[in-house]
Image (cartoon, rainbow, N blue to C red):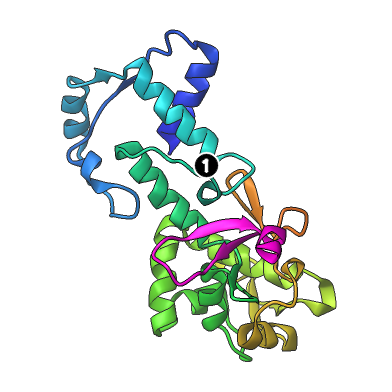
Amino acid sequence: MALWGLCAWRLHQWPEQPDLEIVVLDDATEAGFGRGSIRVTPADARRSQDGARALSLTRVQEMARCWRKVSGRSPVLSTEGRRAGRVSKELVELSTYQAGFFPRMDGRALALSRFDELLFSCLDRQWSTPVNVFVRRSPAGDELRKWLTHTGDVFLAMRLRQWAGHRGDKAALESEPYQPENFMKAARYRLSDVGDAIQRSGLSEIGQGAPLPVWGVTAYDPLAPWVVVDDHTDHQRVQRLEERATS
C-alpha cells in the first residue's frame, strides 16, 4: 500500500512521467496482503537491485487509483464497479480487512466491528493489561492475534485506551493506572456495565462506539455512520446507516 501512495504522489508531481522503478525481492509478489512476509539478506537485496524495472504510466495510474480509494472518505467496499485484475484483487483483500473495523448491521441489530467484538471477548470483569489481552488463550484470542499481525500490538493498547476514554462515566471499559513506564502495561482494563451490555446485546446507537480512523474514513462516526451489512451472503457491503434504514 505504501507503493500505491508513492505512485499517487509521483503522479501528482509529474503526471506525464512519474518515472518509478521497483525492485522485487524474492517471491514478494506471491505473498499478497495477509499472507506473511519474506526474509532477505543484505546481499539478496543488493543482487535484486540489478533487476529493477520501470513501472509503466498505466501501472502507476492503476496504483494511484487504488491509493485514492483506500485513503478516500468512503470505505472501499462502499464503491461499485471495481475492475477485475491483480491490483483489484489486492484492493478487495484490503477493503475486506478495512471493513472489519466498522460496526455491523445484522437485520436491525447494530453490533460491534469484528475487531472490537474479538477485543471485548478477551475482556471480562477482571482487570487485564493489553499484554493479558494479547496472550488470552481462547478462540477469540487466537483470531485477535491474527489481526494484530497487521496492526501491531501497540494498536491493541491504543484501542483499549480509546474505548476507556469514550463517553466518560458511560464508557464501555473501565481503566486504572498500572505500570506507566511500560506502554503495554500502562493501564489495566475491564468491562463496565455498559461494556457488558454492548457485548451481550450490541450497540444502542453508532455513537456509542469509540471512533476509530481507518485510512481516510472513521468508524463509529455518527456524522458518517458507515456499517457493514450482513445479508448472509458471500459478499460484504459497507453502506451508510441511513441508507440501510430506508432500503
Q: Is residue 37 visible?
A: yes
Q: Is residue 46 left or right of residue 75?
A: left
Amino acid carrying label 1: it is Val
Q: Name which residue lies at 42% across and 8% down.
A: 17
- Residue 145 placement: quadrant: bottom left
The residue pinned by badge 1 equals 70
Residue with the most extreme right position: 169
Q: Residue at x 62, y 84 (%)?
A: 199
Is residue 211 left or right of 149 when viewed as pictured?
A: right
Quadrant location of the C terminus?
bottom right
Q: Which residues are magenta?
A: 226-247
Q: Residue at x 43, y 13 (%)?
A: 18
Determine the residue positioned at 45% across, 72% down.
Answer: 232
1 or 68, nearer to the observer = 68
* Whole-percent x, y for residue 14 in the image: 50, 10
Horizontal side of 169 relative to 215 (left or right) equals right
Vertical placement of residue 234 versus 11, above or below: below
Task: Quarter of the image for the N terminus: give it.
Answer: top left
Does the magenta-highlighted stretch encompass residue 229? Answer: yes
Q: Is residue 234 above or below residue 37?
A: below
Residue 107: % across, % down: 59, 76
**Residue 103 percent coordinates (x, y):** 61, 66
| Mark 1 secondary-structure assignment | helix
